[in-house]
Image (cartoon, rainbow, N blue to C red):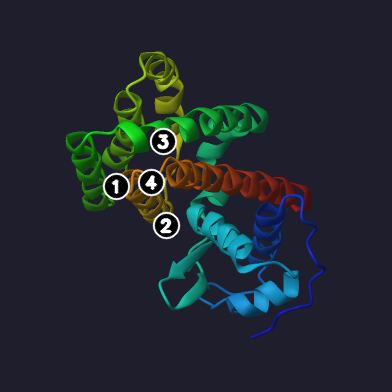
Amino acid sequence: MHFKALEPVSRATLSEQIAKRLAARITAGDWQPGEKLPSEAELCKAFEVGRSSLREALTSLAFIGLIRIRAGGGSYVAEQPSAYLTSPWLKNGVLTDEKALNEFIEARIVLETELAALCAERITPEELSGMEQIVEQMRDSMDKPEEFRKLDLTFHLSMGSAAKNEVLNEVIKGVREQMMELISKSLLLHEGMEQAIAQHGKVLEAFRQRSPQKAREAMHHHLQSFQRGYRVIFEELQRISQNG
């Protein structure tokens, strides 16, 4: 396996920089489809970063379909090119306006992390059971992207009522249309679905533990993975266009 030496990454936007550098190497063909990436230990040493930052970067690359993460088996370059890089949908979809997308996701991070914290304190057993069922239905609908998207949206909107705050609930309803527009246009690759289910599971675990801080962190990580993945795609599309 070939692996060029890499310059250390600055601490400012660690995970995103790692993701972008790995994405550039993958799309440049440094690792072939189906090929296993260097181990986490090797990558951490090459980038001079910690394992948590590296794992966040790998999660983002899995979300956008550049790699597949096998539990206990390492990370592999996806066998097929990421649909995000090849689909003509991108020319007319939500990804054409990076600034608007980033602002929308930032607003969701501000709103939904605190909403998740309130849910951890106030969610009822019945509401928790309902959200657990939504995640199970998401798992069963991974071959039905449209149904999966609706369930994903339902999961996030369910926090509005579970938080027991009418003002926040109305704010969530107010952005529902934009959320539906964004989610309906998302390609939601199989790898991204897997990541969404896993991350929703961590949010639910924080709810079960009645831990506002863990809920806040789990939701923040979930939404950041989404944002970081799209930023990687923007940079790769720009690079491909310039080299094309």
Mark closer to the observer (3, 2): 3
At x 49%, y 35%, the residue is 113
Q: Is residue 55 above or below residue 186?
A: below
Does label 4 or label 3 sit earlier along the sequence? 3
CA distance separating discs 3 and 1: 12 Å
Does label 4 or label 1 sit earlier along the sequence? 4
Three-letter amino acid code of the residue under disc 2: Glu
CA distance separating discs 4 and 2: 19 Å
Q: Which mark is residue 116?
A: 3
Mark closer to the observer (4, 1): 1
Does label 3 or label 1 sit earlier along the sequence? 3
Marks 4 and 3 in Cβ contact (< 8 Å)? yes
At x 62%, y 48%, the residue is 233
CA distance separating discs 4 and 1: 9 Å
Marks 4 and 2 in Cβ contact (< 8 Å)? no
| Residue hosting label 4 | 203
Marks 3 and 1 in Cβ contact (< 8 Å)? no
Could you classify mark 3 by the number of other residues whose Cα lies within 10 Å: few (under 14), some (14-19), or many (20 or more)? many
Secondary structure of residue under mark 1:
helix
Does label 3 or label 2 sit earlier along the sequence? 3
Left or right of residue 36, residue 211 in this image? left
Could you classify mark 2 by the number of other residues whose Cα lies within 10 Å: few (under 14), some (14-19), or many (20 or more)? many
CA distance separating discs 2 and 1: 26 Å
| Residue hosting label 1 | 208
